[in-house]
Image (tube, grey):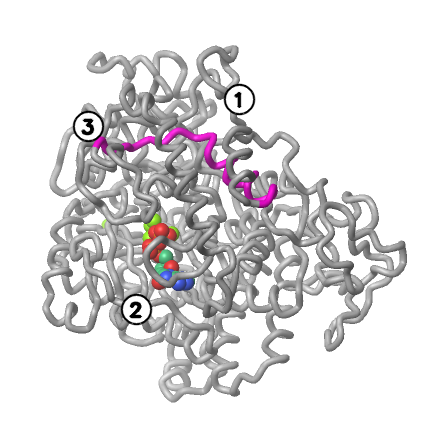
Amino acid sequence: MGLLALGTALEWPEAKKRADQVREWGIKQLLEIWNKAKGKERDALLWGDEVEYLVVNYTKDNEKVYLSLRQAEILKALAADKDLAKEGGCVPALQDTDGKKSNTLPVFHPEFGRFMLEATPGKPWGIGFKELLGVEPDMKLRRKIAKEHMLTSEYPITLTTYPRIGAPGQFTDPYYPPSGDKLRSQFVPDEIANPHIRFPTLAANIRSRRGRKVQVNVPIFHDQNTPNPWKDPTVNYDLHKFPEDDDVRNGAAPDNFIHMDAMAFGMGSCCLQITFQAKNINEGRTLYDQLSPLGPIMLALTAATPIYKGFLAGTDVRWNQISRAVDCRTPEELGEKPLKNDRWRIPKSRYASNSTYISLDHRLREEYMDPDLVVDPKIKAELINGGMDDRLATHFAHLFIRDPIVIFEEDLQELDLSKTDHFENIQSTNWQHMRFKPPPAENNIGWRVEFRSMEIQVTDFENAAFSVFMVLLTRAILSFDLNFYIPIKKVDENMERAHNLDAVLHDKFYFRKNVFPSRPSRANTVFGDDAAPNGTNGGSSRPGSRYPSRPGSPGGGGPVELEYAEMSIDEIVNGSADGAFPGLVPIVESYLDSVNVDVETRCELATYLSLVSKRASGELDTAARWIRNFVAAHPAYRHDSVVGDDINHDLIGAVIELCEREAAGRNFAGLGIPGLSRLLGKFRGGCGSEADAEAEGNGVVNGDAPVVV
Ligand code: ADP
Ligand code: MG
Ligand code: MG
Ligand code: MG
Ligand code: MG
Ligand code: MG
């Protein structure tokens, strides 16, 4: 997110009138960046993670837990901390200074929810293997520093969503009644959003553009005592304060769905994002494409979102809820009414899986592209006239079909080509699962790619594990020249499947069968021209490649449908039983074998790979499964899908305890939290540190195996 400059935010009818101007100026700024940075070379391989937190107000003996709305005060306390400032850690939105390159302490950022915080490392990570081991301690440090600037009863926790957000009664501290003018929600107050004018305006203008409130409906999980059909008992059909109160009378809250009606239900979710800097634009474009098909796989693997508004949901991940929570499409764009005032039908929300591949890779075949892609032809022509190639122009002309939602009057006086604000206005409100980030105007940053689908995990060990795994996978992709291309429509379908309950165990996902490069390619041909004669493209023959040819697997020439198959996450991550598909973790291991890593580092990295591998195989539970089991085993649970205050209290308590114990070491023995060893396993023993060995003997958790992480 960019810095939050203050200004006069336009309400929707006014903003709409200025949309063309913002797009026009945004494209001019983009071309300026393009021309300046397209030849940028040899940027360092840097990367950085973003961890988002919910701030809860929790005490052991009060059954009520609250979302703390003190984001601003906490950020202020962080910014005012002289010791932090000395080390370079700070809050950029509040201390708008440049030259923070030598930061060693984490940086904290505001987020949409007034109960949220985001923290990033003080400066991006390099890819040295030792540096990878710094990630987990840094994440722990972030949590510790955040906690130190909170009240005694406040805790930063990394659940994706607050289980009882929007449930009846008080769930925020302080309490505000719902039905404010901006969100017009019957469940959450306007005060739940960051009060900076950008955020309420974003929510209000999305609602205005749509012509009704957002509709975030999640299927209820049908437990043995859950009525069928189930009617959301928290919906009030008798409100008459705003015109939008009619929504539920017009069918916005169908049977068997948990009904939510505001941006906060989606954008109030926490995720784990990773940004990679590429050495040049082409490498960035390659990474963008190759990471795209991994989005849904990693979403399913990190599933952590089983509860909404106090009910168990029939889905496991946050993605579609956020998508719906910011869906600004009009009835015409949605195809509910014939096109009259709007320009086109738009198949997806502006928060959705990405619809473009952008690389100039000859292996990218025309058939992989989205045949229904909507682009603005005028903008595309302008980009091509400005010197951009067709493929990238298509990508941006697709992003630019959207209207800017928040426009500040002051920014429309004069076009400043040394800035990127208008470009970023559209770019940063296209929340796709990959983001291609051009270099910002001012400093020396290169072309970056952001991987955005992963769910935040409960502990920093897990968050570090998934981050490090993704970093290593990008190294393997580049080093082995891997090819994960499948038709982008199949990526969309995978994204839907990733929502299913325990998708990691029960679902199959489209995945490319042969990911190794085929014979030396003819350089720089465009679509579909990698068709080597049959039989010559069966597998890798790259010099130095560890991978043998696999006769019979299509490498590029045959029909597209033969290039991919439906595989389980276990097969994708750990390899197929018949050895036909090697598996992402073994690929990463081969990469590690091919480079110099000392034994100790390798062992630490192995603990991360092991977590990923065991989550995929089902030996360990996803956070979603762990939470479901926790609820099911709770004495207060009546198997009616209701997650009441008492269960919520104990779940939040467990999560807090887990992270406090994690901060003190890695020994979770004796914590008494059900299911812990199924969540975290016993990974650390192998590296042989004294503390681990000592702890190993005595940790029994509720009859589970010893837990030493
Ligand atoms: P956004 O919210 O727009 O995605 P943030 O600034 O919050 O961006 O975080 C982006 C992440 O990228 C952070 O972890 C940061 O450390 C990292 N980062 C910053 N500069 C670079 C760079 N040049 N290359 C790679 N990652 C970077
Ligand atoms: Mg961020
Ligand atoms: Mg952001
Ligand atoms: Mg964020
Ligand atoms: Mg981000
Ligand atoms: Mg209790």
Where does residue 130 sit, x and y in percent of width and height? 43, 80
Count residues near mark 2 (Cα–Cα under 10 Å), then give few for <14, some for 14-19, many for 20+.
Answer: many
- Residue at the disc numbered 2: 140
Q: Nearer the viewer, residue 240 or 476?
A: 476
Residue 141 appears left or right of 548: left
Where does residue 85 sit, x and y in percent of width and height? 15, 68
State yes or no: Cβ of the residue under disc 2 lies below 8 Å from any atom of ligand 1: no
Q: Is residue 173 magenta?
A: no
**Secondary structure type for disc 2:** helix
Where does residue 556 sit, x and y in percent of width and height? 78, 52
Q: How many marks?
A: 3
Count residues near mark 1 (Cα–Cα under 10 Å), then give few for <14, some for 14-19, many for 20+.
Answer: some
C-alpha distance separating marks 3 and 1: 33 Å
**Does 133 sit above or below residue 638?**
below
The quadrant the C terminus occupies is bottom left
- Residue at the disc numbered 1: 345
Of the two numbered discs 2 and 3 on the same chain, state the one appearing first in sequence: 2
> Type of residue at label 1?
Arg
Let me know if residue 647 appears in the view. yes
Q: Is residue 407 magenta?
A: yes
C-alpha distance separating marks 2 and 1: 46 Å
Of the two numbered discs 3 and 1 on the same chain, state the one appearing first in sequence: 3
Q: Nearer the viewer, residue 304 or 489?
A: 489
Count residues near mark 3 (Cα–Cα under 10 Å), then give few for <14, some for 14-19, many for 20+.
Answer: some
Q: Give the magenta range.
A: 389-409
- Residue at the disc numbered 3: 178
> Type of residue at label 2?
Lys
**Secondary structure type for disc 1:** loop
